[in-house]
Image (tube, rainbow, N blue to C red):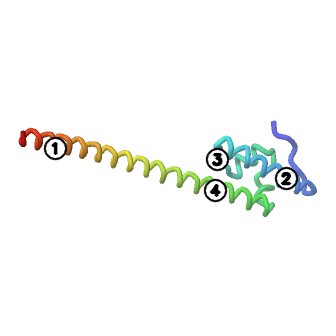
Amino acid sequence: MHEKQRTRHEKPSLIEAVDRAIEEMTEASEEVDFISVARRTGVARSTLYRNTIVREHIAAAREKQRLSLNTQWKLISEVESLKQRVEELEREVESLKKHSGDLSSQKG
């Protein structure tokens, strides 16, 4: 059950509650959006949208998550690319070793 909806005179505590919810959700790797913050805080979505500071904090958290996700995907892609390159180089080294062994046996 949600706690009672906050009133206008509770704006500073609303901002603190939203910031706390964003922090908790971020730490738990939960998606931050107006619906999830409203559920977490027990505040109506319309209240979150109307408060410009709260709206900016939620929007900033969403953008930060989006950028973080993009960075993670880029890093994963780069790691995969590097793994493939290492495998190619390992095959090349093995081939060169074999070729070197073949040349050594021809000289002897």
CB under 8 Å between discs 4 and 2: no
Upstream in sequence: badge 2 or badge 1: 2
Residue 10, percent from left and from top: 91, 54
Residue 28, percent from left and from top: 67, 41
- The residue that mark 4 highlights is 64
The structure residue drawn at horizontal position 17% and vertical position 40%, both measured from the top left corner, is 98
- The residue that mark 1 highlights is 100
Q: CA distance from mark 4 to mark 1?
A: 53 Å
Q: Does 30 appear above or below 56? A: above
Left or right, residue 81 beside residue 61: left
Upstream in sequence: badge 4 or badge 3: 3
The structure residue drawn at horizontal position 65% and vertical position 43%, both measured from the top left corner, is 30
Amino acid type at image mark 3: Glu
- The residue that mark 3 highlights is 31
Amino acid type at image mark 2: Leu
Q: Secondary structure at mark 1?
A: helix
Residue in the foreground of this view, choosing between 105 and 74? 105
Q: Secondary structure at mark 2?
A: helix
Q: Quadrant for the N terminus, please.
A: top right
Q: CA distance from mark 2 to mark 1?
A: 73 Å
Residue in the foreground of this view, choosing between 15 and 75? 75
- The residue that mark 2 highlights is 14
Q: Quadrant for the C terminus, please.
A: top left
